[in-house]
Amino acid sequence: MTGDRLALPERTLASRLVVVARAQRAEDYDAVLEVLADAGIRSVELTLTTPGTFDHLPRLRDAFGDRLDLGVGTVVDEAQLDRAVAGGAAYLVTPITSTSLVRRAVEAGVPIVPGGLTPTELFSSWSAGASAVKVFPAGQVGPGYLSDLRGPFPDIRAVPSGGVDLAGATAWLDAGALAVSVGGPLLGDAFRGGDLGALRERAEAFVRVTRGADA
């Protein structure tokens, strides 16, 4: 599958940055997403390991849908995928390689970024129609891995995730990553009562390196 592959949302592609939001409870999303949106973040992956994500998604879409692409991540089965699609997820992310999930998302018309690490896993998802593949855990391989993958798979679009810090974001993008997926190095302790001013500074720093100083 090539020409008819679903693209990720325009704001996500333009920003080249997805923030992975993993909170203790869904109500904690609100204040953090407000800071992220104000700092120039344009794409957030809401994780299903956060209790209440599905129930809280309509509120978040109402509050932030005009500023943020809200994806749903940690999708591991068809029931979760169907519920995320029904809830209006802008895109889907999985931590696993499942061609059946890729095909189901494509049939539903929603972009999907499935996780994998080995060449076989990543190419399986890509050839099934994934919008991009998530290199996970990226911290175990490094940006040079993407260059190696592009030898046999020159057209593959990759989003590294897991352990990507500020310097790593630059290196992965320089290596040809479509975008970078960032969690802890950007969010820090924000979901544990941390300083939201410091969160804004970290977010702005990532925006500068992913979109340029004038973002």
Image (cartoon, rainbow, N blue to C red):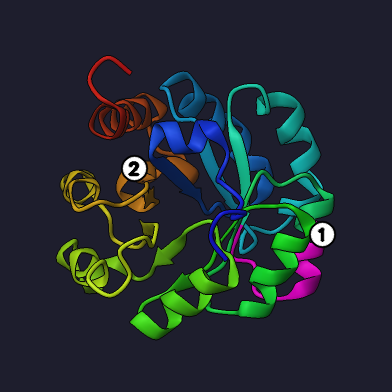
Kind of element beneath mark 2: helix
**With respect to residue 6, does 94 lie above or below?**
below
Query: Where are the magenta residues, as a range?
Result: 73-83
Q: Residues within 10 Å of mark 2 (few under 14, many from 20)?
A: many
Residue that lies at the very extreme toward the top in this rendered image: 214
C-alpha span from label 2 to label 1 = 28 Å
Kind of element beneath mark 1: helix
**With respect to residue 170, does 67 lie above or below?**
above
**In the figure, is residue 91 to the left or right of 144?**
right
Tell me if label 2 and label 1 are in contact, CB under 8 Å: no
Q: Quadrant of the C terminus?
A: top left
Displayed quadrant of residue 19: top left
Callout 1, which amino acid? Arg
- Residues 178 and 68: in front is 178
Q: Which mark is residue 172?
A: none
Give percent across and percent down for residue 212.
25, 24
Instruction: Tell me the residue that label 2 is attached to.
Output: 186
Callout 2, which amino acid? Leu
Residue at the location (65% across, 61% down)?
A: 48
Asked whether residue 75 is drawn in magenta, I would say: yes
Give percent across and percent down for residue 190.
43, 40
Residue at the location (60% across, 36% down)?
A: 69
- N-terminal of the two: label 2 or label 1? 1
Residue at the location (43% across, 31% down)?
A: 14
Asked whether residue 110 is drawn in magenta, I would say: no
Q: Nearer the viewer, mark 2 or mark 1?
A: 1
Q: Quadrant of the N terminus?
A: bottom right
Instruction: Tell me the residue that label 1 is attached to.
Output: 83
Displayed quadrant of residue 33: top right
